[in-house]
Image (tube, helix red, strand yellow):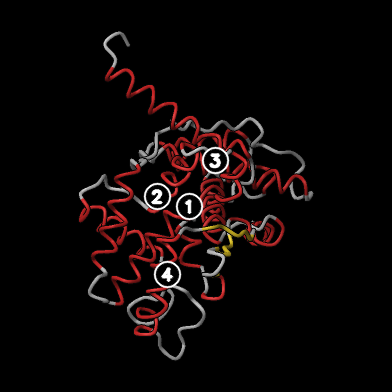
Amino acid sequence: MTAAVAAFEEHLVVQRGLSAHTVRAYTGDVRSLLGRAVGTGVRELDDVDIAVLRDWLADLGARDLARTTMARRGAAARAFFAWTTSTGRTAQNPALRLASPRVPRHLPTVLAVDSAAHLMETARESAADGDPARLREWAALEVLYASGVRVAELVGIDVDDVDLGERTLRVVGKGDKERVVPFGVPAGRAIRRWLDAGRPALAVADSGPALLLGDRGHRWGQRQARETVHRLAALAGVDDVTPHDLRHSAATHLLQGGSDLRSVQEVLGHATLSTTQRYTHVSADRLRASFEQAFPRA
């Protein structure tokens, strides 16, 4: 079974082009499943049935895991056995009838336009003394909000991916799909300041092409980016937000400003329009909440 997991991992990377994070999660889930199966006496993949799968999920559920985690593990099991069946490693797919917990749809945190502007201004003011780390943070926040990129895409940007003249970024998203996204004048100003005064101060001989460098001169990480967003949000006195919340905010503000769904889909790098459509639901839900709170006959 170990060989099957290794081949499945290669399939996820080579044929499906999934991110390293997703590959690690899926293969970890499959190893957990097969470990549980072996513990119940299963020796061959063909011996795994729906009862074994449900027993595995029930055991996980007893650990009070989040529903999103449970849903992902169910998805990993379905993907694995769909692959084993299609490649002839199993005669049938035991996961066809495997149900996953329903994941509740939570409204993401979306900053008001003036709150987002205040957050960006706070980042700019914190960098006024020219400190390289603060210049990096200002540039990072401006790029996250102006372009709606994911945090993994942000830290993956190289210097050559930035076109300050056209004000565009080339980013590589999920599935190694490349796209070009625009950014505005304030973000361009922050990037230019970082490139002129911030990056040279932190660069070392083996910095490589990364746009954003950490304090030791190497590519900035996702964890540091998330910590920066939380800290600057607290400093600005706005709602606590994550980099992904800034992505949600950018998309929502684009739609509220009159942009069409297809354009927003291109900017965000969504594979399907249905994913982008949830931002129309966010706007509608917030409108409903505001109406019910404010209108006397709601």
Residue highlighted by disc 4? 191
Q: Are marks 3 and 1 in contact (CB under 8 Å)?
A: no
Q: State the mark number for residue 132.
A: none
Along the line of sight, the residue nearer the viewer: 260 or 220: 260
For marks 4 and 2, give the CA distance: 18 Å
For marks 2 and 1, give the CA distance: 7 Å
Earlier-in-chain disc, 4 versus 1 = 1
For marks 3 and 1, give the CA distance: 14 Å
User: Could you tell me residue 255's position as x and y percent?
Assistant: 50, 38
Q: Are marks 4 and 3 in contact (CB under 8 Å)?
A: no
Residue highlighted by disc 1? 148
For marks 4 and 3, give the CA distance: 25 Å
User: Could you tell me residue 169's position as x and y percent?
Assistant: 55, 64
Earlier-in-chain disc, 4 versus 3 = 4
In this view of the protein, can residue 89 be seen by the observer? yes
For marks 2 and 3, give the CA distance: 17 Å
The amino acid type found where label 4 is placed reads Ile
The quarter holding residue 262 reads top right
Disc 3 is placed on an element classified as loop
Q: Residues within 10 Å of mark 4 (few under 14, many from 20)?
A: many
Residue highlighted by disc 3? 259
Residue at 53% over, 43% down: 40
For marks 4 and 1, give the CA distance: 15 Å
Residue at 71% over, 48% down: 83
Q: Nearer the viewer, mark 4 or mark 1?
A: 4
Q: Are marks 2 and 1 in contact (CB under 8 Å)?
A: yes
Pick out the residue farthest to the bottom: 205
Q: Residues within 10 Å of mark 3 (few under 14, many from 20)?
A: few
Residue highlighted by disc 2? 246
